Each structure stands twice: as structure tokens, then as C-alpha cells.
Amino acid sequence: MKLQAIREVSVAIQATHRFIYFIPEIAEEATRLGVAERGRTYFAFRSAAMGAVPWQVTLATFYNFSPRAVQTMTGVWDAAPPAQWQAARLTAAGGAMRRVGVALTDHEIAEARSLLDPLVSDADYAGKPLAAANASVALPDDPLLALWQELTVLREWRGDAHVLVLADNRVGPCECNILQAATGRFPAAPVARATRLWSDREWTEATARLAARGWLNDDGTATAAGYEARERIEVETDEHCAALWSRVDERSAHRLAALVTPINDAFTAAGTYSG
């Protein structure tokens, strides 16, 4: 399958997965588990599939957060065990999809699953910790929710691959945020710093390292070489994902993207990302 088709279906999967980080249902479920802080709940929900791992493991797998950001999750497994966090995440996802009226027929869900099931069951999970953890989660009885969980596996598989590529290109956890912001792939730098909790010194030093590679101008904007480097990293991630998609032809990949797109469409129409 051509790399462009891998990129397109990956973008579609990312779009269908992302609502979980914006919906009010996730905060409601976290409150029921006794944790109200948004940062702590993000780390708990997303890493719950890995079990009661220490915050250092979450830091390693999430990659682009500072240690001080991830360390805030300390104690979340005391509030509730990972299995409850995982179950609550699925409850939130299912409730949100019902609320916004995701319109997929039983036939469309079954067709999408016929394409996804072999990918999830046959994938090589070596070096893919978040994908492997999500693949171990028992699929819920709700067909639409089970579909979303399988999409989550593939979303995290690409994310794990992207981390490997970043490390191979010597783009560290702080640097990747700066490069993303400079090339317009991430919200403004202040947002990245506020959510990832990088200090002024760390941000300045990482910026200097990227500038020394010729990737940033003096004002912090990306140079042509910076844009090229960022695209090369994406292409290398696509290349890494070629093995995952080797059992699927381009027609099936495009069909899968079309089948799952209504999930993102429903959340977009509901104003989920406009706040």
C-alpha cells in the first residue's frame, strides 16, 4: 500500500479516537472515581490499559510530557485500580457516542470490524507498549464501542511507532513539542508548555538544540529545513506503519477510513472541538 494511503487512513483513525480527550463524560467518570484534576485523569485513563504502572512508565510511553507533568498522576491507582479506570473510559466513550448520535449501521460496524479484526489480531506489538496494552483490553459487548476500542489500538500503534522514529532522529520529548508548534502541527507554544509543564530553562535549551540543527529561526519559527525534518519524521512513521497495513489493500484502507469518519463528523457537528 502506498505511504499516502497509510497516512490518510491513520489520520482518519486519529480523528475518530480523539474525542475521548474533550468530552464532558470523561470528567464525570473521573469524579466518580475520586479524581477531579484534568491532568491526572488524562494520564490515568490513557495508561490504565497497562495496569498499575508507576508514573515513570507512563512518562516513557507518552514521551512528550515533562516528568513533573506525569508525576502528578501519583496516587491515581489508590483512588481506583486500573481496571476501573479502563471500564470508566469505555463508559464515557460509549455515552458520548450515544449523546452526539454517531450514525453507523450494524452493517457498517460489522464491515469496519471485518477490516480491523485481522489488523489488531495479527499486528506485531514488539516495541509498541500502548498498542499492546489496548489490544489486551477485552472488547465490550456494545458493537460501536468495541469498534472504537480497536481503533484505539491502531491509533496507539502509530503513536508508539512515532516515538521510536522521534528517538531515532534524536528529537527529544521537549524538542518534539517545540517542532510541532513551530510547524503548525500543534497549538501555540504557550499551550504546549502549559499542558506538558516544561520549564523556561528546559524550553530554552531545547529550542537552542533545534536551532543548532538549522530547524528554527531566531524568532522560533521553523526554517525550511525544520519543515522538511518534521515531514521526514512523518514519512518515516508511515514507513514504520507499512508492516501493520501489509494485509490491507488501498481500496480497503480507504473504505475503512470512510466507514469510521462519521464518528468524528458527529463530534465535530456537536461542537466538541470548538471550545
Image (cartoon, helix red, strand yellow):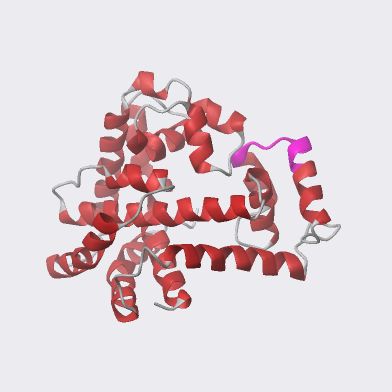
Q: Is residue 219 left or right of residue 98?
A: right
Q: Find residue 228 and report its horizontal and vertical position in percent.
A: 68, 69
Nearer the observer, 98 or 13: 13
Q: Find residue 204 and report its horizontal and vertical position in percent.
A: 79, 43
Displayed quadrant of residue 265: bottom left
Q: Residue furthest bottom?
A: 251
Residue at the (33%, 52%) spot, across then down = 153
**Quick check: is 197 in the magenta stretch?**
yes
Magenta stretch, overall SS? helix
Residue 100 in view here: no
Nearer the observer, 87 or 264: 87
Residue 72 in view here: yes
Residue at the (13%, 69%) spot, across then down = 107
Displayed quadrant of residue 50: top left
Q: Is residue 117 left or right of residue 32?
A: left
Nearer the observer, 73 or 272: 73
**Which segment did they paint magenta?**
195-203
**Quick check: is 75 in the magenta stretch?**
no
Reply above or below: 108 against 120.
below
Q: Is residue 207 left or right of residue 191?
A: right
Q: Find residue 260 and report its horizontal and vertical position in percent.
A: 30, 66
Reply above or below: 119 against 23.
below
Reply above or below: 35 against 1.
above
Nearer the observer, 145 or 246: 246
For the N terminus, the image quarter is bottom left
Residue at the (55%, 43%) spot, across then down = 63
